[in-house]
């Protein structure tokens, strides 16, 4: 090639912004001076905020909250950063300081994207999903191009704390450092492109140019540092979680003391509303509003669907004390605590003897006092539920009435009479339990039929509410064996119904079943071997889902008699998402357990078991177990009970309580949880 022609080629490369070739790679120094490029500050206009941005202060630090309504307003042309040429750096670091709110398991939220005009593809982006961080980039080396996703697993950020991330990129190597801890390194087959054009491209803060996937947390720092791994520059402070390279001025301002006649105003207080009183609703309309819960001395922020704790006095369970002896009409098989809006807190006891039947008590001046007697026939349990503005209370009757009829009854709250009145009678067979639930906007009521005569292997029934007739009508029957309990729960979009099968006529060692709602009916999902199962209790701790079974006794007519029928383990199962089934998590020794109740005090989680009989006496201790994380549940408090049948946890403005029923004496007890 002649010298003039060679010079012409070089000049063409220079004019096109290509730079020079050095060692087979291209330098990027002509696009910038390698200073930190503050993406966050570019979105903030001088002296104010962009539309769709708010400033909040949490844990002493300020950050931006972004609105989903105007995603394009949170963007700016890439040319404002890349002033000398239109190529993204080949090697760089991205520094982010953020505070993540809890998001649903399958949701992704974008921290930032770089997108070309008129194209839906993401040239460069950072996306967060629960437990994962994804770095996205577009490779244009081949015709049409393709997108590469680099995933960093086990990145836990949703703990309501500030975190600083450093993502370093060089060719095929990608490294993520969270709060200056040990870097997570990933090597992929496709390298980051050496020449990624950003011509007619724009940065978008917290979104990908549309409302779906907008970042719902707080952003404090978002910096692009070309040509270097920024970890060494960031990890020089003691507070690694909020290490700073470049932060917008409005987030750094420290309020000054006002003049005596001047009201101190903070930018982050603009449009902030604080609601007082009882638990308000939290929808998209209330998003970014605060609620102060005076009874718990806590401040909460609405994230558009739930109240997230910002500041709360954390209580810890210290001990349990007897608070009230509740004299009942007779032995109590079950209890139901519920609140009727604008009326008060109530407890319904399912009593064995009729007459006088069962009773409803109202919480008055810090005690339960008799409110209404209801005729029942060896009642086993109550279920409170609502359909629209209608309020119902259903009783499971175990025996026939005076006329030889066997009905369980649904009662409706009369606002005019201020009491429950008979609404619908349903034929049942030694009914043990009712469960009310809603699926896809339709109301259902399921009854557990225990036996018909001496036959324990009979159908239990699921009823569907008919809004036209205003009655429950049979929707589905499910075969059960001496069943005691239904438990309804949801996981994501799926609905489940678990039955506790107790006795098949010859053995208590039988399978209890979990059903899943598919195509308009419940279908078998999983079977679990149980021993006289009397109760299922579903509960959640963080993102984990558990299901506890109360095993009452072990009996098999074809097996040798055990030394003790009633000293038997009850079990806790945990949902394994990968296996799509519940797997055993922990066994706990129990004495003819009949009920589990889950409750929380502050940040601590507890399970209390109703131990009813140890083979010798009904005067046995029921036990409160405390969640200890890796250790599972550990016994924390032993409570003297007599024939304990059921537990209910409830809260009032005065504190937290447990109520237990006795199936062996006409006395139930309210216990108060004393906290520190």
Image (tube, grey):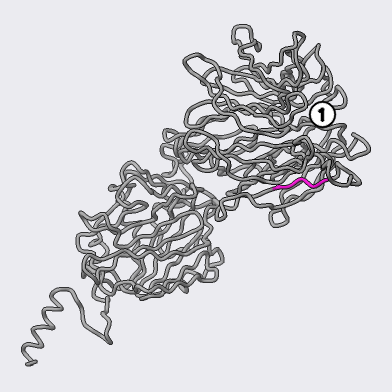
What segment is highlighted magenta in the picture? 568-572
For residue 556, above or below residue 378: below
504 or 421, which is in the foreground? 504
Residue 598, position as x, y percentages in the image: 70, 39
Q: Splitting the image into 4 quarters, where does residue 565 fall?
A: top right
For residue 183, above or below residue 527: below
Instruction: Name the quadrant of the N terminus.
Output: bottom left
| Crowd band around label 1 with a 10 angstrom C-alpha radius: few (<14), some (14–19), many (20+) | some
Q: Is residue 373 visible?
A: no
The prevailing secondary structure element of the residues shown in magenta is strand
Q: Splitting the image into 4 quarters, where does residue 655 fall?
A: top right
Residue 127, position as x, y percentages in the image: 40, 57
Q: Is residue 490 visible?
A: yes
Residue at screen point 46% across, 59% down: 97
Q: Is residue 52 magenta?
A: no
Residue 663, position as x, y percentages in the image: 83, 27
| Residue extending farthest bottom | 2
Residue at screen point 73% across, 52% down: 586
| Residue extending farthest front | 558
Return the residue at label 1: 323
* Element marked by disc 1: strand
Residue 168, position as x, y percentages in the image: 41, 71
Q: Is residue 536 left or right of residue 544?
A: right
Residue at screen point 74% across, 19% down: 365
């Amino acid at each position: 090639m002649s010298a003039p022609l060679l010079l012409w080629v070089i000049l063409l490369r220079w004019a096109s912004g290509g730079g020079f070739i050095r060692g087979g790679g291209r330098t990027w120094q002509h696009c910038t001076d390698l200073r930190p490029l503050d993406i966050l500050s570019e979105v903030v206009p001088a002296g104010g905020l962009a539309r769709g941005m708010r400033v909040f202060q949490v844990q002493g630090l300020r950050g931006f909250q972004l609105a989903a309504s105007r995603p394009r307003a949170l963007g700016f042309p890439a040319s404002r950063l890349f002033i000398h040429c239109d190529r993204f750096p080949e090697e760089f670091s991205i520094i982010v300081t953020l505070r993540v709110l809890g998001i649903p398991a399958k949701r992704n939220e974008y921290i930032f994207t770089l997108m070309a005009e008129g194209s839906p593809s993401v040239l460069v982006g950072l996306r967060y999903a629960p437990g994962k961080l994804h770095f996205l980039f577009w490779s244009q080396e081949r015709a049409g191009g393709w997108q590469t996703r680099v995933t960093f697993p086990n990145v836990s950020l949703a703990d309501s704390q500030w975190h600083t991330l450093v993502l370093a990129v060089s060719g095929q190597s990608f490294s993520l450092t969270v709060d200056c801890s040990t870097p997570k390194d990933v090597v992929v087959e496709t390298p980051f492109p050496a020449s990624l054009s950003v011509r007619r491209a724009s940065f978008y803060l917290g979104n990908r140019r549309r409302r779906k996937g907008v970042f719902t947390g707080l952003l404090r720092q978002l910096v692009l540092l070309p040509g270097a791994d920024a970890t060494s520059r960031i990890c020089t402070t003691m507070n690694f979680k909020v290490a700073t390279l470049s932060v917008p001025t409005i987030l750094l301002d420290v309020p000054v003391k006002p003049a005596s006649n001047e009201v101190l105003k903070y930018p982050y207080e603009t449009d902030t509303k604080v609601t007082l009183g009882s638990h308000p609703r939290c929808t998209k309309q209330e998003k970014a509003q605060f609620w102060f819960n005076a009874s718990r001395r806590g401040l909460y922020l609405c994230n558009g669907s739930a109240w997230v704790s910002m500041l709360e006095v954390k209580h810890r369970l210290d001990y349990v004390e007897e608070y009230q002896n509740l004299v009942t009409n007779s032995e109590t098989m079950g209890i139901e605590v519920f609140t009727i809006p604008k009326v008060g807190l109530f407890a319904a006891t399912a009593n064995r003897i009729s007459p006088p039947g069962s009773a409803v008590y109202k919480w008055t001046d810090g005690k339960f006092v008799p409110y209404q007697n209801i005729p029942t026939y060896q009642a086993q349990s109550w279920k409170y539920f609502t359909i629209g503005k209608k309020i119902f209370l259903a009783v499971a009757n175990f025996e026939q009435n005076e006329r030889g009829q066997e009905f369980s009854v649904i009662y409706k709250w009369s606002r005019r009479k201020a009491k429950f009145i008979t609404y619908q009678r349903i034929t049942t067979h030694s009914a043990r339990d009712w469960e009310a639930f809603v699926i896809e906007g339709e109301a259902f009521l399921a009854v557990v039929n225990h036996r018909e005569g001496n036959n324990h292997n009979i159908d239990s029934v699921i009823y569907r509410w008919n809004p036209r007739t205003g009655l429950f009508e049979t929707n589905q029957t499910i075969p059960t064996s001496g069943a005691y309990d239904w438990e309804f729960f949801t996981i994501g979009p799926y609905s489940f119904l678990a039955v506790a099968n107790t006795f098949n006529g010859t053995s208590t060692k039988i399978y209890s079943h979990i059903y899943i709602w598919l195509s308009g009916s419940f279908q078998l999902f999983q079977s679990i071997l149980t021993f006289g199962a009397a109760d299922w209790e579903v509960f959640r701790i963080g993102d984990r889902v558990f299901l506890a079974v109360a095993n009452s006794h072990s009996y098999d007519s074809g097996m040798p008699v055990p030394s003790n029928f009633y000293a038997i383990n009850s079990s806790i199962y945990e949902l394994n998402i990968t296996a799509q089934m519940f797997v055993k998590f922990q066994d706990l020794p129990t004495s003819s357990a009949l009920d589990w109740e889950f409750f929380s005090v502050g940040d601590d989680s507890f399970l209390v078991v109703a131990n009813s009989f140890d083979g010798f006496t009904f005067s046995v201790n029921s036990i409160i177990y405390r969640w200890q994380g890796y250790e599972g549940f550990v016994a924390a408090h032993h409570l003297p009970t007599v024939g304990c049948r059921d537990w209910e946890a409830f809260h009032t403005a005065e504190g937290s309580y447990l109520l237990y029923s006795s199936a062996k004496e006409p006395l139930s007890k309210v216990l108060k949880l004393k906290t520190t």
